[in-house]
């Protein structure tokens, strides 16, 4: 048995739309905040990791070039310090196990190579294969950094699609659904009240003196917008 009155149903449906809009507003506000800080987070994490890998590559090239320069020892030492600094930065901004593995491999491979470079003669080319291998590992790390940046961009794009769907449902679909339901319920209520007015008028026509209940019902219907028909407007 349905114990809900039509007034209760109307109030419930009328409360759904603002409640959902309130929740949607909180979600949308949170999304705007996330999108607002996303560029800074990318700059401070994924982009910083990519810059660190590029710094390692540049330092390695300069070391290889510096071995043939007059101040070879100083150039190599300066670039080694820069290389080690870039490794620490990369460690601070890595976001995957694959990146961590590449960074540790670079650090392990670079340590003995740098020790040998400090004492190598300028014309010694025996280090070239090791340098090329280290450059290859750095290139792999740069590819992983690019993949991490693309993953963040794809995630943001996916979240934006979700937020678009939430906005459409919460701000357009739900209010219109509630409007249609309220319109149908109020239409049924209008029909029933109109029928009640007709019945009250029928009862009044058959009674010489309307009862107290009939007068009270007549007054209630008038308060609800269904007054007694004006005889001057009758056909």
Image (spheres, helix red, strand yellow):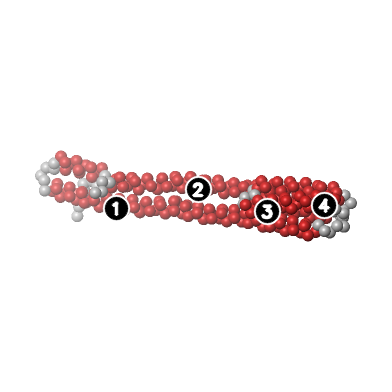
Marks 4 and 2: CB-CB under 8 Å? Answer: no
- Which structural element holds mark 3? helix
Name the residue nearer the viewer: 55 or 229: 55
The numbered dot on residue 102 is: 3
Q: Disc 4 marks which residue?
A: 117
- Which structural element holds mark 4? helix
Taking the view exactly as shown, the residue that stands out farthest to the right is: 70
Residue 149: tell me if it is visible: no
Q: Disc 1 marks which residue?
A: 187
Percent of width and height locating residue 224: 26, 44
At 82% from the left and 52% from the top, the residue drawn is 117
Q: Disc 2 marks which residue?
A: 28
Q: Give the distance between the C-alpha atoms of the residues marked 4 and 3, in whole angstroms.
A: 22 Å
Residue 175: tell me if it is visible: yes
Mark 4: few/some/many CA within 10 Å (<14, 14-19, 20+): many
Marks 4 and 1: CB-CB under 8 Å? Answer: no
Give the position of the C terminus as an image quadrant.
bottom left
Q: Give the distance between the C-alpha atoms of the residues marked 4 and 1, in whole angstroms.
A: 89 Å
Percent of width and height locating residue 91: 67, 47
Marks 3 and 1: CB-CB under 8 Å? Answer: no
Q: Earlier in the sequence, mark 4 or mark 2?
A: 2
At 65% from the left and 51% from the top, the residue drawn is 100
Taking the view exactly as shown, the residue that stands out farthest to the top is: 212
Q: Give the distance between the C-alpha atoms of the residues marked 1 and 2, in whole angstroms.
A: 34 Å
Mark 3: few/some/many CA within 10 Å (<14, 14-19, 20+): some
Mark 2 vs mark 3: in front: 3
Q: Earlier in the sequence, mark 4 or mark 3?
A: 3
Q: Earlier in the sequence, mark 1 or mark 2?
A: 2
Q: Earlier in the sequence, mark 4 or mark 1?
A: 4
């Amino acid at each position: 048995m349905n114990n809900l009155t039509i007034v209760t149903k109307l109030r419930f449906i009328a409360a759904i739309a603002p409640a959902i809009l309130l929740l949607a507003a909180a979600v949308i506000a949170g999304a705007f905040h996330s999108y607002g800080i996303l560029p800074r987070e990318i700059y401070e994490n994924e982009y910083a990791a990519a810059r660190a890998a590029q710094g390692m590559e540049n330092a390695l090239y300069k070391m290889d070039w510096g071995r043939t320069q007059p101040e070879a020892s100083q150039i190599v030492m300066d670039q080694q310090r820069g290389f080690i600094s870039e490794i620490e930065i990369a460690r601070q901004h890595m976001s995957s196990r694959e990146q961590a593995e590449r960074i540790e491999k670079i650090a392990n491979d670079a340590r003995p190579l740098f020790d040998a470079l400090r004492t190598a003669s300028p014309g010694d080319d025996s280090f070239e294969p090791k340098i090329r291998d280290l450059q290859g590992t750095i290139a792999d790390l740069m590819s992983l950094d690019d993949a991490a940046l693309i993953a963040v961009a794809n995630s943001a794009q996916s979240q934006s699609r979700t937020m678009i769907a939430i906005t459409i449902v919460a701000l357009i679909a739900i209010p219109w659904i509630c409007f249609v339901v309220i319109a149908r319920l109020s239409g049924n209520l209008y029909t029933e009240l109109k029928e009640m007015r007709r019945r009250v008028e029928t009862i009044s026509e058959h009674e010489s003196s309307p009862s107290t209940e009939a007068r009270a019902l007549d007054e209630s219907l008038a308060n609800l917008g269904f007054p007694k028909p004006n005889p001057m407007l009758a056909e």
